[in-house]
Image: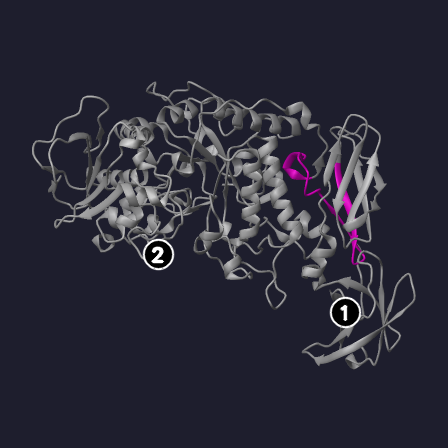
Amino acid sequence: MLSIRRSFFAYLDEMSLITVLLPYSYFHGESTAFLLKGEKHPINLVIESKEKMQHFVKYKCRLNEKIQIGQKYEVEDGNKGITDLQIGAVIRTPSFDEEFYYDGPLGVDYSSNQRIFYLWAPTAQQVKLVLQSPDLSNKERTIVEMERQEKGVWKTIYEDEVEGYFYSYLVLINLEWKEAIDPYAVAVSVNGETGVIVDLNKTRRQKPVLPALDHAVDSVIYEAHIRDLTIHPDSGIQQKGKYLGVTELNTETNKKKPSGLSYIKDLGVTHIEFLPVHDFEEIDELEVLKKYNWGYNPSHYNVPEGSYSTDPIDPYVRINELKEMIYTVQEQGIRVILDVVYNHVYKKEDSSFEKIVPGYFFRYDKYGMPSNGTGVGNDIASERSMVRRYIVDSVRFWIEEYQIDGLRFDLMGILDCQTMKEVRAICDNVDKSILIIGEGWDLATPINHDEKAIIANQQLLPRIGQFNDQFRDKLKGSTFDIYDRGYALGNKQYKDEIPELLAGSIGTYKDKGMFFEPGQSVNYVESHDNHTLWDKIDICFSNESAEEKIRRHRLATSLVLLSQGIPFLHSGQEFFRTKYGVENSYQSPDEINQLDWNRKDQYLNNVEYIKGLILLRKRNKAFRLQSVEDIQRHVTINQQSNDIIQYLLHDLQGFKDEWETILVLINVNDSAEEAYCSEEGWNIIVEDGVVYQDEYPSVHGDRIMMNPISITILAK
């Protein structure tokens, strides 16, 4: 990087507007004229305004001729001083987007006879490709000049074989050289220090045939972190903390019970959602166990994380091992969702985006400061055409190259609706069953409210699911107040809200629903974020017995699986996962985050119960109705005077389910209560933590006694 001293500053802030800042220490900030000098004739700038600021005088000057962004220009003031014209706020204008939108190839086009390199860097004055042999004893770097094409794209064709070579780009912008990794890189060296050229054709494999998934509501999602899932000493897994650890089948706990992937298959879920597997920061890939991280620190979006690989030095190994993991999960009949973090980067200043096209990929507030809706110092500007294109390209890459079955968008509310609609369209072009879900929180980022991909704008986001925070908070209690209790924890002030939540939050029991179709509601009471449900219950009910805590937990989790919409379970939730009271465990050690497989064996009865509810949901479409009309036609929810909720699924003959009528009875009282069935002839299919599979007890008469804090399901 060059050290540049400037007496004053000039910025291109619009295509025809230059802002000049003259410090008071420089001729008292005074100038009567400004001249723009480039390769052609000088251009007189028209001073439109002059404003005295705290440290300088600000001049706004109008251009009457079009200039070529990417060429070198200088501004001369009336005192004959000269400074370079820097790229300023112009980069964030619609006219810049329109002029430089590019839809051609980007990244490395690798073929057997030549390698073509493309980089979008419209504000750069020069770009050079840097190549280095993978032979670490050879430190020599080859520098190749690149040629500027239309739309600000730089290109070079390299004839020699460079498979396995390290590569990067040198980019000259505003008289400063910076070295950056290709944002479109698909492989990197250890710890993501540089890009690596690979032939992905060598890693391709055929995707297994998966069971049909007719609709999003047929999904049961199980969220897992690769390291958490495999690292426990008693997991029975050999490759602990690795992609390949997930692929190990028929592993067992100390008590010879299933663990790992075979256990998840037996549980019956349809999807595993893995926390981020794209390359992320804060884990040394050569000393993996020194630190822990969830993975929400993205660095290279199209590259597998190296800390989960058995050999992070070899870029092919991490690619092949991630593909092996995805393939093996799919072979078990389970779909794979990847958690993606397109809303921010780890550090803006260090990112390839900022080095290659500074100021473009991130949002800025009205004062010119980076916006911070994400809480980590930067927000991705998805509304800009080439940022949107990057996100869509990346999604397409993961779907086509890694053959995934869904994406979970972290902090999706930072992104804009148009980007998410294009993501949905890309997925549909490949497979309409691909699931898209996200966190639609309304965050303080500077785009219009009606553009944000948030819950309030769900009418603009068909077939995109949102995490239902109302379901979470009204059943469990506030995520942000540990002592606040929801309905499932005995707080009856929410009892009138529960029918709407059970019915998919689509407006059946309210004037206006959160969602426009049940497939938009992702129902959950626990995820990797915040306290586990068990820990919240343990803190709120510290004086209760373990049995009472189990009842509360079981009731809340049951409602996740029985409600209309998409059920979402946190791994280990079925055996009362604990993080020992740690609320935000993103950097906590393995002892806090790991799945305790011994705990699974300890609570095997509850595991069997949750497994039974998943099977019940799969066998009965009544719990996964696909439309608002079906829910309104087949769901009736009432409350008895003793606060028992009756969730009736009726007139089900056309679905060819196991049962034509199903009645779910919910008792959150601390006392046993009599529930009215309104008629006779019922079979008991679920009662007090037991799911009956074939021989069903009968209800005698039109009422049944329910245990405290329990769910009973009747059918006929």
Residue type, mark 1 in image: Ile
Residue drawn at 61 percent across, 68 percent down: 367
Q: Is residue 463 magenta?
A: no
Residue beneath disc 1: 18
Dot placed on the residue nearer the N-terminal end, 1 or 2: 1
Task: Report the quarter where the C terminus lies.
Answer: top left
Label 1 Cα crowd, 10 Å radius (few <14 / some 14-19 / many 20+): many
- Pinpoint residue 503: horizontal percent, then vertical percent: 30, 45
Is residue 303 in sight in this rendering? no
Residue beneath disc 2: 512
Residue type, mark 2 in image: Lys
The label nearer to you, 1 versus 2, is: 2
Residue drawn at 11 percent across, 34 percent down: 680
In this image, 369 relative to 514: left or right? right
In this image, 141 relative to 271: left or right? right
**Image quadrant assignment for residue 128:** top right
Label 2 Cα crowd, 10 Å radius (few <14 / some 14-19 / many 20+): few
- Pinpoint residue 587: horizontal percent, then vertical percent: 48, 43
Q: Secondary structure at mark 2?
A: loop
Return the residue nearer the eye: 497 or 492: 497
Return the residue nearer the eye: 93 or 168: 93
Q: Secondary structure at mark 1?
A: strand
